[in-house]
Image (cartoon, helix red, strand yellow):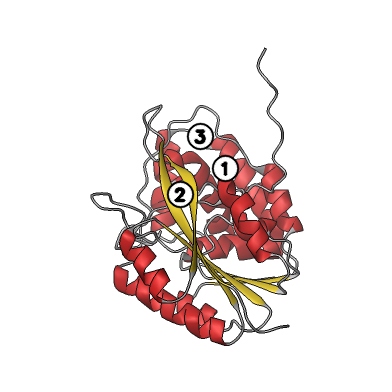
Amino acid sequence: MARKKEPSPYTKPFLKWAGGKFLQLPDILPLLEGHQRLIEPFAGGGSIFLNAGLKTALINDNCSDLINTYQQLKENAHDIITRAFRLFQLYNGQKPYLRIRQKFNEGRYTPAERAAVFIYLNRHCFNGLMRFNGKGEFNVGFGKYEAPYFPLAELENFLGCCEGITFSCEDYSTVIEQAGAGDVVFCDPPYEPMPDKEGFTQYSNGTIFKMADQERLVKCALEAHQRGATIIITNSGAESIRELYRANGFDIREVLVKRSMSSKAGTKTRAKDVIAVLESLIPF
């Protein structure tokens, strides 16, 4: 007899998101404890801020559609959820998916409609990939799911976590510049690839996050640390990344994670990622 799976103690995001940190929460959440405000320059699907338990948070991402969806839900949840639910009910199939994707890329939706469509696309596209090309067009194919899951419970949980959160769509440096004593800055940038691997080097909007960007991120983080913030950065275990963090005084911790972005069953692999930490030295 199969053992019944225990329910997760954590709040699940309503979006699928490549590189999400839901499975790493036991390693990350203890590092956030005792701080007054969370700052996330690369929020993604939201596993961290949904579970951080801090009173206030500044949540940022350079994907404007992601932040629009968060903001629209915060301001007009009933309307967005109702619109999204109708899309799930009426438009499951490759042809309607491609038609809605085309209208989305042509900018033919209001901000509220666009938020609902973003949820629809995320749950109907292949593997929940949120990927835009250089023209800003969402270009992920249909996922061929018989009955995509409508994340009502997860949407309601999101709403319960919104109080005290400010959402923004800025360059990560602009957000980190606001960090100081009492803040914990959690950074989950696109990962530096391992040798002979592609890695997660792209933003969702199609731009590439290069090693020079990793270095600029560390520079911004060090300045925030000098102002009193605690810094946490996750990344691949690439030796170039380890050297960058070691040279700048970070405490490096290894975590074993699963990788799976293939459409084939049984293709999950394990990798050693790192969590780099600079603890605040300024009391607050």
Image marks 1 and 3: residues in contact by CB distance under 8 Å: no
- Marker count (numbered): 3
Q: Nearer the viewer, mark 3 or mark 2?
A: 2
Residue highlighted by disc 2? 18
Label 1, residues with CA under 10 Å away: few <14, some 14-19, many ≥20: many
1 to the left or right of 254: right
Report how far apart the C-alphas of labels 3 and 2 lie in the structure: 22 Å
Q: Position of residue 268 (x, y in %)?
A: 41, 35
224 in relation to 203, above or below: below
| Quadrant of residue 179 within the rendered picture | bottom right
Amino acid on which disc 3 is placed:
Asn
Report how far apart the C-alphas of labels 1 and 3 lie in the structure: 8 Å
251 in relation to 85, above or below: below
The numbered mark, 2 or 1, whose residue comes first in the sequence reads 2
Q: Position of residue 170 (x, y in %)?
A: 49, 76
Residue highlighted by disc 1? 87
179 to the left or right of 220: right
The residue at the point 58 percent across, 84 percent down is 178
196 to the left or right of 166: left
The numbered mark, 1 or 3, whose residue comes first in the sequence reads 1
Residue highlighted by disc 3? 92
Report how far apart the C-alphas of labels 2 and 1 lie in the structure: 23 Å
The numbered mark, 3 or 2, whose residue comes first in the sequence reads 2
